[in-house]
Amino acid sequence: DAGITQSPRHKVTETGTPVTLRCHQTENHRYMYWYRQDPGHGLRLIHYSYGVKDTDKGEVSDGYSVSRSKTEDFLLTLESATSSQTSVYFCAIRLADNYEQYFGPGTRLTVT
Amino acid sequence: AQSVTQLDSQVPVFEEAPVELRCNYSSSVSVYLFWYVQYPNQGLQLLLKYLSGSTLVKGINGFEAEFNKSQTSFHLRKPSVHISDTAEYFCAVSGVGTSGSRLTFGEGTQLTVNP
């Protein structure tokens, strides 16, 4: 599983509240990613990081921000959660010597 | 920019039958190609990958895929499926040298193996 954990694994929150999801890795990988998975859309990239304090937007970044203050942690924040952000969120890492990505177990977020 | 189209959203088959899950891609640069499998309520697991070299790649669980550059396809095959292969399968592409080496996924194909 490439040493990736996500927390929390499940969360229910109300519209308008801030939410932070955490991705933690233990193997010092440089690249980390946040995706969301929705029926009929596959996985879509939200943000990614290519090093400490180095991040960039993906295809569905509106309403999300990220931070990476140390190599092992990549945080995804929903500043003010909306019902359209109800989804399953996956974190991934990329191996240094090729383009393979390995995924965490996911966080199921429900915004009511 | 790159995109992936999985041509079948659902594929029902009987146990021990062969199966092919179809994937077409588009990209303005050379690509790396991947197939992932997702079992119910689990994360994604890498099934196989094409980076370079032989166009026929073998993966875990008896799956294989063939990269066809002229047809921009990367179809996944298994000669004889088992009940345990029931899962959702995702094709993904990454453009070589693109920013962040991001993956673009298809919408997924639900493979259901019936007894």
Image (cartoon, coloured by chain):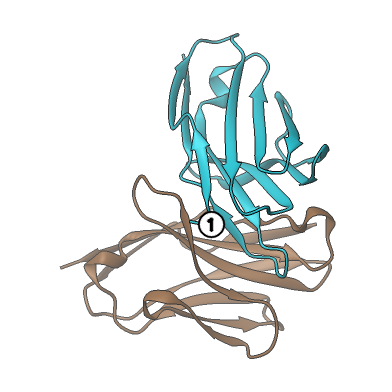
Chain colours: A cyan, B brown
Q: Residue furthest left?
A: B115
Residue B81: which quarter of the image? bottom left
The quarter of the rendered structure image containing the C terminus of chain B is bottom left
Question: From what the image shows, is residue A37 above or below residue B27?
Answer: above
Question: From what the image shows, is residue A28 above or below residue B15?
Answer: above
Residue A49: which quarter of the image? top right
| Nearer-the-camera pick, A102 or A25 | A25
Q: With A51 as the anchor, is B14 left or right in this view?
A: left
Residue B41: which quarter of the image? top left
Q: Amino acid at mark 1?
A: Ala
**According to the image, label 1 marks what residue?**
A2
- Identified at 65% across, 38% down, the residue is A73
Name the subunit of mark 1. Answer: A
- Identified at 65% across, 30% down, the residue is A76
Question: From what the image shows, is residue B56 above or below residue A39?
Answer: below
Q: With A63 as the anchor, is B85 left or right in this view?
A: left
- Identified at 74% across, 35% down, the residue is A68
Question: Would you call the spot at circle 1 few (<14 residues within 10 Å), some (14-19), or many (20 or more)?
Answer: some
Counting from the top left corner in percent of width and height, residue A89 is at 54, 37
Counting from the top left corner in percent of width and height, residue B26 is at 73, 66
| Nearer-the-camera pick, B79 or B34 | B34
Counting from the top left corner in percent of width and height, residue B99 is at 84, 55
| Nearer-the-camera pick, A9 or B74 | A9
Q: Residue furthest bottom?
A: B54
